[in-house]
Image: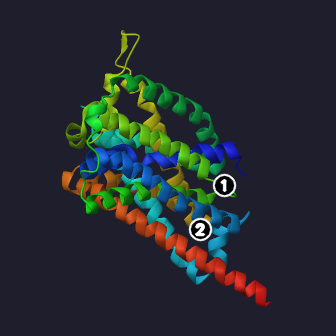
Amino acid sequence: MTSKLENFSVNYFLTRALFLGIGFSIIIGLARQDSIFSFIIGTLLGLILILLINKIQKMKGNKTLNELLSEMKGLGIFLRIIFLFYGLALLCEGLTFIQLFASSFFLIHTPIWFISLPLVFLLIRICKNGKIATFRVAACLFPISFLLTFVSLCALGGYAKVDNVTPFFITSYFDFFKSVFYYTTLSASPSLLMLITEKSNSIGSYLLGSITLITKMFLIIAILGPILASIYRFPEYIILKEIKILNFIEKIENVVALSWIFDEFIYLSMASLLVKEMIPKKKNLFHPLLIILTFFIAFLFIGKYYKNELTIYYFFPIFTFIAIFIIISTLLYYFKIEKKKNKTS
């Protein structure tokens, strides 16, 4: 069984993972400086989803997700398919944007396929050792990630200009609603991956992760301004270039950006573990094959074509909402039926 610290660490990374390349840029494009309020309101709404996931965890008890789905019979088969596609979609999104991020700033002349290939083999290796390995790695990376995030936020505070943040409430109601919707789904939906463990509570880690995201959003708008921030695909990385410590330590953005790499790595590892759990144990060979197939899809059909990247960029938040709605409502319905059966028997 995983420890409280390990569960806390994993969900902290999951809360932040979908904002690299998608979350910040798409919400700023919609709400500009009102994005700060979108993040705050989205956090409150996201807490409702987190509470529902925690409720499912409590009702699930010490059962593994695989055991629960096996008990559910027909509904379990339906949910197993949804979970499998959900995990593969998360893997595809993560591999696409991690290679886009790396090829844009770090390995400009390196072939895209080569960037994420080592990560694919690492995912296969760490999942072979089971979820305990992933959760322990997350617990080890958490203090490093949080320290890097805290230092960067403090260092960037001096470059913020309040004039760039105002005026507020300039966004149309429809765009503001969309931005809140995007934040809620992108921040809370990855917590579904916590269902592969037992008795986890995601409220504290979700709030901590959200606080770092809200603070980062404020700094992006306050440093770059809403117009310039909406142009960049990775505004969260661009503002790191501003950091100068003691007026001579600079160009440390690549070191600080490790916190985002950690987010993506744990997120991809958890998605890979979910895929593995949805496959019958007798067919474990299918797991590495599915990971490799997802890598080729991310590289050949999405990463190479900007139009396909845009499709994921705009439709992925909708997909995650549909997935989390189906999964949560189906599981709660099953537990409600089981509770009635136990009362009558």
Against 271, residue 250 (above or below) is above
Give the amino acid at mark 2: Pro
Q: Is residue 227 left or right of residue 252?
A: left
| Quarter of the picture holding the C terminus | bottom right
For disc 2, the marked residue is 280
Residue for point 30% across, 29% down: 161
Answer with the quarter of the image where residue 213 lies: top left
Against 106, residue 130 (above or below) is below
Residue for point 52% across, 60% down: 275
Q: How is the image coloured?
A: rainbow
- The crowd level at tag 2 (other Cα within 10 Å; few <14, some 14-19, many 20+) is few
Residue for point 31% across, 32% down: 162
Give the amino acid at mark 1: Ser
Viewer-side residue, 37 vs 243:
37
For disc 1, the marked residue is 200
In this rendering, the label closer to the viewer, 1 or 2: 1
Q: Is residue 285 visible?
A: no
Viewer-side residue, 139 vs 29:
29
Q: Is residue 99 left or right of residue 230?
A: right
- The crowd level at tag 1 (other Cα within 10 Å; few <14, some 14-19, many 20+) is many
Viewer-side residue, 180 vs 141:
180
SS at circle 1:
loop
SS at circle 2:
loop
Q: Is residue 193 visible?
A: yes
Residue for point 59% across, 56% down: 194
Q: Position of residue 141 (x, y in %)?
A: 57, 34
Q: Are marks 1 and 2 in contact (CB under 8 Å)?
A: no
Q: Position of residue 218 (x, y in %)?
A: 37, 38
